[in-house]
C-alpha cells in the first residue's frame, strides 16, 4: 500500500514524466519510471482505481521498454517489463514448498463450528479464542516466495509438499508485485499463500468475447484460472485477467534466519495487514475478527446472501484461529491445520419423488427404513436411496409415499431428506406402512420404550447374519483379506455360511468350482482367513458386533482382560470400573454374554484356532495416543535413551522420522540440540517439545 504522501508524489511524478519530450537513459530517471509504472499497476490491479488513462500508461511503459532494451545493464528484476516474459515454458520444474500446503477441514453448520471451537480451546488450553473469518476463494492456490523484497518464485500447490514452478506466469499477473517492501517489517525471506482467481464480471466478459469470436466458451472461472495459471505461455496468463489474492504467511524469516512467525508476527490479522501494506490484494475488506464462535456463525450467515453479489466465486468461508501462538499450539494433521476450518455454504438441494420405502435389517437387528427415490443428481452424484433413520423421523416429517421430497447433500456428507413439499401433493400420497414383522425372518419386531428403533430379536435371522459376517470380516474388525461384502453374500446364499464360525470351515474345493473363482483368489481367501486367527484380542471383540462396542471401546476393554472368556464372567459393575465404559455399554456386553448362542460362538471360534487372549505383543501396541503423528528426537536425552524413546513412540501408535522435513509434527529436544532444532524452527508447522512435554503427551 502506498501512503497518501507517496501517492501524491507519484501522481506528480507521472505528470512530470508524461510532460517530457526527451528521455535520457539515466539510472535515476529509469528508476523513477519503473516505480511510477509499478504504482499505477497497483492502482489499477489492486485498488481498481486508476488515475491515468490507458494511453498514458502505455506511453510510459513503451519508454521504459525502449530504454531498457537499448541499455540491458539498466534492467532490474522488479522492472514491470519483466512481467512480459519471453518464450514458452516447456515443462514446469517441481519445487519444494517452504512449509506444507495443506487442505482444510470442512464444516457445515453451527454444531460443527462449536466442535471446532471446543477442540481449539482444548488444544490451546484457553478459555478464549479469537477467530478471523474470511471468504474461501474458489480458484487455484499459489505460493509466492520473496527474498530481499524481490519475487523469486511462484509455485502451484501440487501435492502439498512440492508444486510446479510457475514463476514466469505469476510475473505476468499485474496484481502480484515483483518487489514488495517486506524488509520494512524486518522480513528477509517470506513465503505467502493465496488464490488465483478470475473475477466473475471479467469471466463473463471474457466468455462473451469468445462467443463473439466463435471460440469455445470456458466452463467456469475456477477451472479457467487454474488452467491459465499453468499455461506454457505466460502471456496467456496475463490475457486471461488472472488475479492473486493473498491470505496467508506460511514462512517468514529475518536476515539472521529467525522464524518471525514465532517472534514478531502475532496474529493472522497482523499478517494480512502486512500483505496489504506491501501492496497485495488481500481479503482485508471482507474479513472480520470475532471474539467467539457465535459471532463467527453470525458473520458467516451475513455472507451467505452477500456471496451472490460478491464479484469472486466463493464456496464458503474460512475460520482461522487469530493468534499465531495459538495456531502453533493447535498444530496440523498431515491433511489440514487444526487451527482453521472451512465452512461450506448451504447444502445443495434437489426435489425428487419418493417411490417406496424398503426396510433393512442391520447386524444388531435394528430395522432401518430406506427411501427409494427417483434418481436425482446432486452435488456431483446421483442419489436414489436415502436412509430415513426410524419411524419417528418419518412421522415427524410427515413423509408419505409419492410425496415430493427435498433432498439435501452438503459436500461429501451423506444425503438426507429435509422434508416434503406439501403444496405439491396430489392426493396420490399414502402413509409409509412400518412393518411389525422382520422383513427377513418374519419374527415379531420389538421396540424398547426408551428407543426409537424397532428390532428383530431372532439370533438366527438371515439378514442379521449377513450383516454380522460382513462386519466380522471388515477392516476395523478381523480385517480378512480377500473376503468382502459380495463374497459373504454369495457364500450365505449358497449355504456355505450360516453363522460366523462357518468362515473357518469353508468348502474350498467347491468354491474353486464357482464362476469367478480361480486358484489364486481361493488361496488368497484361505490365507486371509487363516491370518485372521492371529488377530489381537480387541479386533475379535469389535468383530463380535456387540451393540455400542466399537474400536475404541474394544481397545479399552481388551487392555483389562486376559481372555475373551473373562468378559463373560464380568458384571455391569466390574465393567463400569473400566475407564471409558459407561452403564449402557456394560449392559449391552452383559446382555450379549447372557445369550448362549453367543458364548457358543466364542467357544467354537476358540476351538477353530481363533486367538481369544490378550497377548503381550498386542498389549504393547495398545495405545494410539500418537496415531498419525511423526516424531524426531535430537540433542542428548536426559530422561530416556534413544531406543526407549523410539519404543514409546511406536507403542503409542506414532511414527519416527529420520530427519527434519515438513512431514515432521514434533521435534523432541534434549540438551545441546543443534542443527536439527535450527532447521525445525524454520518450519512453522513443526512443534518443538521438551522431554517432559513428550512424556506428558503419552502419560
Ligand atoms: P480444500 O482444497 O477444499 O480442502 O480447501 C483448501 C484450499 O482452500 C486451500 O488450499 C486454499 O487454496 C483454498 N482457500 C481459498 N480461500 C482460502 C482462505 N481464505 N484461506 C485459506 N485457504 C483458502
Ligand atoms: Zn429377522
Image: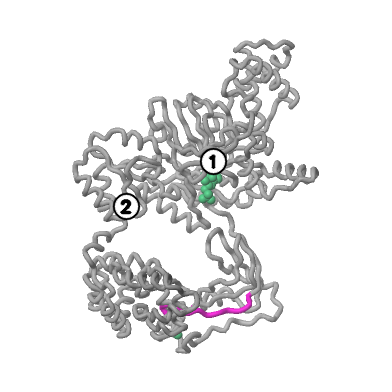
Rendering coords of residue 618 (x, y %): 26, 63
Tell me: residue 462, above or below residue 249. below
> Is residue 267 toward the left or the right of residue 315 in the image?
left
Q: Earlier in the sequence, mark 1 or mark 2?
A: 1
Q: Residue at x 62, y 68 (%)?
A: 406
Question: Which residue lies under the disc numbered 2?
Answer: 654
**Image quadrant where one finds the N terminus:** top right
Q: What secondary structure is marked by label 1?
A: strand
Q: Decide: few, some or many residues near mark 1? Use Cα within 10 Å; few <14, some 14-19, many ≥20.
A: many
Tell me: residue 663, above or below residue 568. above
Quadrant location of ligand 2?
A: bottom left
State yes or no: residue 195 in magenta: no
Q: What secondary structure is marked by label 2?
A: loop
Rendering coords of residue 460 (x, y %): 40, 86
As measured in the structure, the alpha-carbon distance from the residue carrying label 1 to the one carrying label 2 is: 30 Å
Residues drawn in magenta:
354-367
Identify the coloring: one colour
Q: Residue at x 54, y 35 (%)?
A: 154
Q: Residue at x 23, y 62 (%)?
A: 617
> Is residue 388 toward the left or the right of residue 608 in the image?
right
Question: Which residue lies under the disc numbered 1?
Answer: 156
Amino acid at each position: 500500500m502506498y501512503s497518501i504522501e507517496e501517492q501524491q508524489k507519484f501522481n506528480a511524478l507521472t505528470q512530470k514524466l508524461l510532460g517530457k519530450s526527451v528521455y535520457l537513459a539515466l539510472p535515476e530517471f529509469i528508476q523513477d519510471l519503473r516505480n511510477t509504472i509499478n504504482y499505477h499497476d497497483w492502482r489499477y490491479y489492486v485498488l481498481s482505481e486508476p488515475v491515468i488513462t490507458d494511453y498514458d500508461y502505455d506511453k510510459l511503459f513503451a519508454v521504459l521498454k525502449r530504454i531498457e532494451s537499448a541499455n540491458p545493464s539498466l534492467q532490474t528484476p522488479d522492472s514491470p517489463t519483466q512481467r512480459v516474459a519471453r518464450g514458452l515454458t516447456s515443462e514446469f520444474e517441481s519445487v519444494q514448498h517452504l512449509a506444507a500446503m495443506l487442505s482444510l477441514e470442512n464444516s457445515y453448520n453451527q454444531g460443527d463450528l462449536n466442535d471446532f471451537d471446543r477442540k481449539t480451546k482444548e488444544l490451546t488450553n484457553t478459555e478464549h479464542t479469537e477467530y478471523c473469518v474470511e471468504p474461501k476463494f474458489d480458484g487455484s492456490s499459489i505460493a509466492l516466495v520473496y527474498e530481499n523484497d524481490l519475487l523469486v518464485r511462484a509455485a502451484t500447490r501440487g501435492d502439498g509438499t512440492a508444486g510446479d514452478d510457475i514463476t514466469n506466469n505469476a510475473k505476468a499477473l499485474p496484481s502480484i508485485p515483483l518487489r514488495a517492501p517486506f524488509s520494512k517489517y524486518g522480513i528477509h525471506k517470506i513465503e505467502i499463500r493465496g488464490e488465483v482467481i478470475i473475477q466473475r464480471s471479467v469471466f463473463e466478459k471474457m466468455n462473451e468475447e469468445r462467443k463473439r469470436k466463435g471460440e469455445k466458451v470456458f466452463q467456469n472461472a475456477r477451472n479457467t484460472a487454474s488452467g491459465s495459471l499453468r499455461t506454457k505461455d505466460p502471456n496467456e496468463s496475463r490475457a486471461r485477467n488472472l488475479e492473486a489474492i493473498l491470505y496467508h504467511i506460511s514462512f517468514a524469516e529475518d536476515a539472521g534466519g529467525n522464524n518471525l512467525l514465532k517472534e514478531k508476527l502475532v496474529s493472522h490479522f497482523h499478517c494480512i495487514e502486512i500483505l496489504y501494506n506491501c501492496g497485495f490484494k488481500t481479503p482485508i475488506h471482507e474479513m472480520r475478527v470475532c471474539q467467539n464462535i457465535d459471532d463467527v456463525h453470525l458473520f458467516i450467515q451475513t455472507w451467505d446472501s452477500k456471496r451472490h453479489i460478491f464479484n469472486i466465486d466463493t464456496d464458503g468461508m474460512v475460520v482461522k484461529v487469530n493468534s499465531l501462538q495459538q495456531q502453533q499450539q493447535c498444530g496440523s494433521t498431515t491433511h489440514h491445520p487444526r487451527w482453521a476450518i472451512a465452512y461450506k455454504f448451504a447444502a445443495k438441494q434437489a426435489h425428487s419423488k419418493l417411490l417406496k420405502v424398503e426396510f433393512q435389517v442391520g447386524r444388531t437387528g435394528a430395522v432401518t427404513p430406506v427411501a427409494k427415490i427417483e434418481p436425482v443428481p446432486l452435488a456431483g452424484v446421483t442419489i436414489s436411496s436415502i436412509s430415513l433413520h426410524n419411524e419417528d423421523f418419518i412421522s415427524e416429517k410427515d413423509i408419505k409415499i409419492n410425496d415430493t421430497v427435498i433432498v439435501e447433500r452438503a459436500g461429501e456428507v451423506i444425503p438426507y431428506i429435509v422434508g416434503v413439499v406439501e403444496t405439491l401433493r396430489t392426493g396420490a400420497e399414502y402413509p409409509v406402512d412400518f412393518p411389525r414383522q422382520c422383513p427377513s425372518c418374519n419374527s415379531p419386531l420389538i421396540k424398547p420404550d426408551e428407543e426409537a428403533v424397532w428390532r428383530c430379536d431372532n439370533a438366527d435371522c438371515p439378514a442379521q447374519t449377513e450383516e454380522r459376517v460382513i462386519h466380522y470380516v471388515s477392516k476395523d474388525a478381523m480385517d480378512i483379506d480377500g473376503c468382502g461384502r459380495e463374497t459373504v453374500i454369495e457364500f450365505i446364499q449358497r449355504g456355505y455360511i450360516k453363522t460366523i464360525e462357518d468362515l473357518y470351515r469353508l468348502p474350498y474345493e467347491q468354491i474353486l468350482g464357482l464362476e469367478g473363482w480361480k486358484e489364486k483368489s481361493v488361496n488368497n481367501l484361505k490365507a486371509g482367513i487363516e491370518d485372521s486367527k492371529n488377530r489381537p484380542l480387541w479386533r475379535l471383540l469389535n468383530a463380535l458386533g456387540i451393540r455400542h462396542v466399537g474400536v475404541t471401546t474394544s481397545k479399552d476393554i481388551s487392555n483389562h482382560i486376559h481372555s475373551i472368556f473373562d468378559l463373560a464372567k464380568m458384571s455391569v459393575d466390574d465393567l463400569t470400573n473400566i475407564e471409558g465404559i459407561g452403564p449402557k455399554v456394560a449392559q449391552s456386553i452383559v446382555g450379549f454374554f447372557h445369550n448362549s448362542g453367543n458364548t457358543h460362538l466364542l467357544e467354537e471360534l476358540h476351538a477353530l484356532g481363533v486367538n481369544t487372549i490378550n497377548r503381550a505383543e498386542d498389549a504393547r501396541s495398545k495405545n494410539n495416543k500418537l496415531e498419525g503423528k511423526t516424531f524426531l528426537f535430537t540433542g542428548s536425552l536426559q530422561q530416556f535413551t534413544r531406543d526407549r524413546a523410539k519404543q514409546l513412540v511406536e507403542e503409542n501408535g506414532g511414527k519416527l522420522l529420520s530427519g527434519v522435513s515438513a512431514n515432521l509434527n514434533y521435534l523432541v529436544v534434549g540438551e545441546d540440540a543443534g542443527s536439527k532444532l535450527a532447521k525445525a524452527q524454520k518450519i512453522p508447522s513443526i512443534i518443538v517439545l521438551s522431554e517432559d512435554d513428550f512424556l506428558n503427551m503419552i502419560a
